[in-house]
Image (spheres, helix red, strand yellow):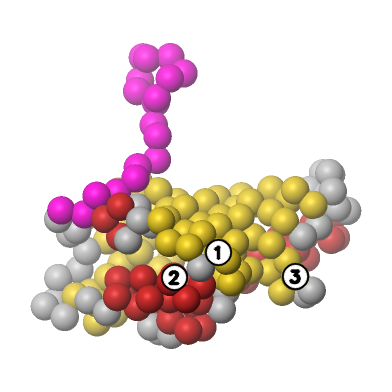
Amino acid sequence: MAGSGPMGDLEYLVARQEVADVLARFCERIDEYDIDAVAELFTEDCVTDYGPGRGGRVVGRQALAERLRTGQEEFARTHHQLGQMTVRFDGPDTCHASTYVTAWHERFDGSTPVVRLRYLDRLVRSGNRWRIAERRALAQGAEGFPGVEWRWVARRRPGCGREP
């Protein structure tokens, strides 16, 4: 059952939807270039890593806001679309989410790079509010980002057994 483990079925479903709403708000706010509102979705001591070509490891909400501000200012428009998501609760106030993301960007010169990512997040609930405490973004495909170094999702090679 969905609620097996640290919570019952209804509690699990409510918490899962609250987590999904936080991730959806991230997409809305980043696409609106409302960086302060994006930062509020993260804990004060958050740790993020969007890969070496997009700022690398960043610690703290304020540092994240600056990284996002400079990383997003090159775009006239963006569209972040969430796909499938899995959520695993470690308790009623902590969970891990793995979410597929397609992020379309339009630069001021009209070029439109696209990246497909997997967000690996750890979220925590304080009071009645979920926030992202850790985020690691792994690339699954990228076009139009020449010279950007990504961390890629590991993929096994066909015929090579279980090792990536």
At label 3, which amino acid type do we have?
Ser
Residue that appears at 59% across and 62% down = 133
N-terminal of the pair, mark 1 or mark 2, is 1
Q: Return the residue at label 1.
A: 46
Q: CA distance from mark 3 to mark 1?
A: 14 Å
Q: Foreground residue, 77 or 6?
A: 6
Quadrant of the image containing the N terminus: top right
Q: CA distance from mark 3 to mark 2?
A: 20 Å
N-terminal of the pair, mark 3 or mark 1, is 1
Residue 78 in the figure: left or right of residue 38 = left
* Residue 150 position within the rendered picture, expressed as x and y whole percent measured from the top left: 29, 49
- Secondary structure of the residue carrying tag 1 is strand
At label 1, which amino acid type do we have?
Cys
Q: Is 1 located above or below residue 69 in the figure?
A: above
* Residue 119 position within the rendered picture, expressed as x and y whole percent measured from the top left: 48, 54
Q: Single out the mark in the foreground, 3 or 1.
A: 1
Q: Foreground residue, 44 or 121?
A: 44
| Mark 1 vs 2: CB contact within 8 A | yes
Q: Foreground residue, 92 or 42?
A: 42
Write the start and end of the magenta stretch as one range. Answer: 147-164
